[in-house]
Image: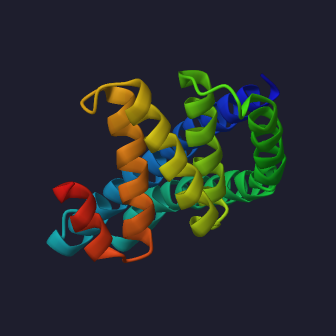
């Protein structure tokens, strides 16, 4: 349960991070569009440089402030990403107690551990765990089941990250 809570927290954090970055990024986009319109007015002669500068300056200040916000959000995210080893340890502990249980809950914890390992760049370990989860799910479920496909997709992604294209082809043929 601790491991699942850790992973759920990480997932919620990632979703929140995406939202937090998207908001200032949209502000930067809007500000740049406004500056572009101001420059078009200047080039076309509809407005003089003093007018354009007076209106563009606060817009550029807003854009710079939004960029600083994005930088702060990313810095905080990197700080929190340091918690991945804690999530890994929690999943390993949960799996150590459940190794004899060859059920879907065990396979879900295995997939989550593989994802945490992958996020830390531990691709070889992640692949081993992911293959075990896929094998377990194939024993318990039909090959077309969503959970089997999920583990298969994760394994393919791990192999692709390592540029092991031949193995990806083999997986799809089998």
In the image, what residue occupies the spot 81% across and 27% down?
Answer: 2
Comparing 16 with 41, the one in front is 16
In the image, what residue occupies the spot 42% across and 42% down?
Answer: 151
Q: Is residue 47 visible?
A: no
Comparing 119 with 23, the one in front is 119
Please give left or right for residue 68 compared with residue 127 in the image. right
Comparing 158 with 27, the one in front is 158
Q: Is residue 16 visible?
A: yes
Comparing 162 with 40, the one in front is 162
Q: Position of residue 60 (x, y in %)?
A: 51, 61
> The N terminus is located in which quarter?
top right
Please give left or right for residue 37 compared with residue 5 in the image. left
Please give left or right for residue 122 compared with residue 138 in the image. right
Question: Residue 70 lies in what quarter of the image?
Answer: bottom right
In the image, what residue occupies the spot 27% across and 33% down?
Answer: 143
Please give left or right for residue 89 compared with residue 104 in the image. right
Question: Residue 97 lies in what quarter of the image?
Answer: top right
């Amino acid at each position: 349960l601790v491991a699942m809570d850790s992973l759920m927290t990480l997932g919620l954090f990632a979703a929140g991070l995406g939202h937090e970055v998207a908001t200032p990024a949209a502000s930067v986009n809007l500000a740049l569009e406004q500056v572009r319109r101001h420059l078009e007015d200047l080039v076309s002669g509809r407005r003089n440089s003093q007018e354009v500068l007076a209106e563009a300056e606060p817009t550029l200040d807003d854009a710079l402030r939004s960029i600083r916000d994005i930088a702060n959000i990313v810095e905080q995210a990197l700080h929190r990403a340091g918690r991945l080893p804690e999530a890994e340890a929690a999943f390993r502990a949960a799996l150590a107690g459940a190794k004899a249980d060859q059920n879907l809950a065990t396979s879900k914890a295995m997939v989550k551990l593989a994802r945490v390992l992958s996020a830390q760049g531990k691709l070889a370990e992640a692949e081993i765990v992911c293959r075990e989860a896929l094998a377990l799910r194939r024993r318990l479920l039909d090959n077309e089941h969503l959970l089997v496909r999920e583990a298969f997709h994760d394994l393919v992604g791990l192999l692709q990250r390592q540029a092991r294209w031949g193995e990806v082809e083999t997986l799809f043929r089998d």
